[in-house]
Every structure is written in C-alpha cells, then in structure tokens.
Image (tube, rainbow, N blue to C red):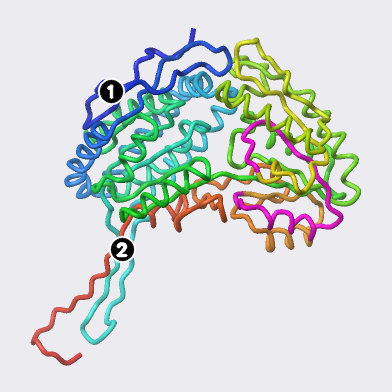
Amino acid sequence: MSAIASPAIHNLVGGKWVTSTSPAGIELLNPATGEPLGSSPSGSPAEVDAAVQAAHTAFASWRTVPAGDRVQYLFKLKALLEEHLDELASLITIENGKTLAESKGELRRGIENVEVACGIPVLMQGYSLEDVAPGIDEIMVRQPLGVCAVITPFNFPLMIPLWFLPYAIATGNTVVLKPSDRVPFSAARLVELIQETGLPDGVVNLVNGGKPAVDALLDHPLVRAVSFVGSTPVAKHVYARGSASGKRVQCQGGAKNHVVVLPDADRETTTKIIADSAFGCAGQRCLAVSVTVTVGDAKDWFRDSIAAAAGSLKVGDGLDPATQMGPVITQASRERVVGLIGQGAEQGAKTIVDGRRASGNGAGSFVGPTVLDGLPAASPLMETEIFGPVLSVVHADTVDEAVAMIERSAYGNASSIFTSSGAAARKFRTSVSTGNVGINIGVPAPMAYFPFSGWKGSFFGVMHAQGRDAIEFFTDKKVIVERWPKEWSRKF
C-alpha cells in the first residue's frame, strides 16, 4: 500500500483545510502499480475566490513584516524539508512514478531555492543617489505585488513550486498554489510543512483543480502575478489570458532539446550522460535531451553505444532501489508515447531500441527506453515534444549544420555539445539559439541563483524563474525623488 495517508484532497484557505465542493475531476492512479490513490477535484471559481480573498487579506500585514523576519520562516522550512526528505521523496515517487533517487534529486534542487530566497534582505535591496540635482535625492525601493498565483505541472511536484513560492513570500507577497491535478499529494504535504513553520495564516494557500481553477486564477482581479510551468499550448493560453487581465505573467513552456556529439567527445562518458538525460525521469522533464545530432565520425560509435546503454536500463517501480527508470505518468501518456514511436518508424526511422513492449509489473504505465535512428528531417516528430523516454539520433556533417538544425526548432529551452575542443564549444555556446546551454553536460539545469532561461516557444514573459529574475518578477520598483529645503524655491 502507498505511503499516502488519505485519498482525500483538501484545499488550504486562510490557514484552514477545507473539503472541495467542486465536481470530481480525474481519477489518480499510482503510475507503477495502477493502484488507486484517490480522485482530484475539478476546482471552481468560488473555491479560487476564497483562496485569493484569504491571500489578499493576509497581504496587508505580511507586507509590513521586516524582510529579516520573513526569511526566518524559510530557514525553518529548509530544516523541515531536510528532516522529511525521505517521506517527501516517497510521495513524489508514488504519485509521479520517478525513482526515489530522482525524487530526492528534485527535492535537493527545490531546497536550493529556499536557501537562495533566504538572502532576500540583500537581494531585495534597492539603490539611491544623493544630489541628483542640488538638494534633491533619488531612491529606488522594491515593494511586493500582492497576491501571486503559482500553477505547477506533474513532472516535478515539489521542485517547481519551490522555484516560485519561497521568493514570492520572502519578498512580501502572498501565494495561491495550484498544483497539477495529477500530483496533488506532494504539494499538500509541502503546504503542511509550511504551516509547521508558523507562517501566518493566508500567506500561502492551496487550491486544487484543473482548467476551471486555472482560468479563475487568470481572471481574478486580485491576482497580481502568475507563474506557470507546463506545455507550450497551455503556456500560451495562460500568458495571453493572464496578460489580457493586466497581470504580470511568466510561463515556462515545452521543449525539444538537442545535444550535439563531436567525434572528439569522450565516448563512454558522453554515452552515459546522454542516456541519463534522455531516459532519466522517463523523459518527462523539460530539459531532457530528445534529439542527438552526431557530427562526422561520431555517427557510428554513438549509435551503437547509446543503443547498448538504453537496452541495459532496468525499468520498474521507482520505489524499488534496483529500478533505473520508472513509468510515465498515466496510461494515456503511455499510449501517446507508444503512438509517436510508431509514427517515427512509419516515417523512416529505424527503431534500434524499442520500448513499446515494456510492461514493468503489467499494471503500470511503462514505456521502455527507445532509440530512433535516422528520423527524417521533414518528420513532424522532429518538432514534437514527446515527453517520454524516446531519443532520436540524426546526423550532420558539420557543427554549423547541427546548430542550424537547432535554430529551425520552434523551441529554445536547452541544447548541449559534447567535445574536447574549447574552440568548438565556445562557438556553439555563442551561436546556439537556446536559453540554457550545456558543455559536456546532458541536463543544463541552472543552479537556483541563476535564471531558468528558456527562449522562443519554451518561454513567454520577461523575467524567468529563480535567483535575481525571481526578485524582479515578484517586486515592483518605486522611485522616490525628495528634497528637504530650508527655504522653498522653484529654483533647482
């Protein structure tokens, strides 16, 4: 049986846990076992309004709490996250499917953001200049926005809420968190731990649901800012609808990430890192490599090497320490991924490792690691975000040709190159059209003190998640021009 204490899913509104009265949404199953975990509510405008009103009420006093006092709650939260790391990792694995090691890694990256947000007394500082004109001083200060909505996806149930939430509350805002309706239990436990810090009621609120809840947040006049991570079509919807109602919006969308392998790359290390990137978290992460572009003589050795690595991975329940890759999130997702693999084969790709028959224990939504060799450039699959453990291997004669292939993509989340040549690496990082770039790195995920910097169809907005961008996003700048003359005069 799972470690989920209760299948009931509640909202947190103004410090009180309340049962949703909205219609039932989706049934939740353990992706590895098919075991029922509960059902998620669809959400309603009334429930969203209650959470937003509670956050708005709390903002009046929370914004006046000194920054040094606000971060004390984050110090306590970090300690609680460390104390409950194993419990939280198990929850993530049960409702998402990834391995325990991956769940713990996700939590570590989330905790990094809590740590960085603890520096708000410095990060939130403005600046000033005396005597911009005789006797006149000018000051820029940062002030919180108000109620901020955080809408997060299923693939990182706790890391992505922690991209936003610590910065939002540390800068003096209040938050309504709406987690993915696929993974509500991890978020609920996170919010319980936040309550244990003694954070004032209403500063963080939780509302569950699907599209009705999202749209209610986007339309609510008291919501000042929206942070979102999800697919590009939904990101476009969130960005357009939220912006149209005057909100500040940041939306991380989908991806089609490329990695370029040069002939001088270290063969063993390159293969291992790319396999980890392509098949880790069952390919369900926005920085997973989806297309490997071999250049020159790298073609033959990489194809054989990656096929061997993919074929050796043990697929199964993420709670089993021997498992190296878990299932995808749902049976519907499995069917979609399997269908896309079939399309690739029909369009001319050779399926040198075929994961369509992976079964795990027979009840879960498993897809095995898959390698498609020689997918035609004209194939729609070259532009489709598969979001599963599928790696396409294509070939280019030169680095310039590989970079041009990345340039043609509608996405711009991440790209990487594997090489021993500093000159080739520098040229690549300068010219490639993605916001995150790896040099001999398979998953170029920025540390918490750098922005998560997607480009093109992978991001909509101006300020990204994490670090200094988060401070900019969650604060308004106010410029004060003042003078205190001994005698009033119109002369400057």
Query: Residue 450 placed where, x, y %?
Result: 52, 52
Residue appearing at x 66%, y 18% in the figure: 323
Q: For mark 1, give the secondary structure.
A: loop
Q: Which residue is mark 1?
A: 20
Q: Which residue is mark 2?
A: 477
Q: In the orientation shown, which residue stands out farthest toward the front?
A: 346
Q: Return the residue nearer the eye: 264 or 453.
A: 453
From this view, report whether residue 217 is shown above or below residue 315: below
Q: For mark 2, give the secondary structure.
A: strand
From this view, report whether residue 220 is shown above or below residue 388: below
Find the distance from the CA under tag 1 to the CA under tag 2: 37 Å
Residue appearing at x 22%, y 81% in the figure: 136
Residue appearing at x 64%, y 39% in the figure: 288
From the viewer's perspective, tell me whether residue 315 is left or right of residue 47: right
Query: Residue 226 placed where, x, y %?
Result: 37, 47
Q: Return the residue nearer the eye: 181 or 377.
A: 377
Labels 1 & 2 near each other (Cβ < 8 A): no
| N-term-proximal mark, 1 vs 2 | 1
Amino acid type at mark 2: Lys
Magenta region, residue range: 384-413
Q: Residue 141: name its quadrant.
A: bottom left
Q: In the orientation shown, which residue stands out farthest toward the bottom?
A: 491
Q: Which dot, 1 or 2, sits closer to the camera?
A: 1
Q: Which mark is residue 276?
A: none
Query: Residue 444 placed where, x, y %?
Result: 63, 46
Q: In the orientation shown, which residue stands out farthest toward the left?
A: 487
Residue appearing at x 35%, y 23% in the figure: 41
Amino acid type at mark 1: Ser
Q: Quadrant of the C terminus?
A: bottom left
Graded by Cα atoms within 10 Å as few (under 14), some (14 to 19) or many (20 or more), the crowding at tag 1 reads: many
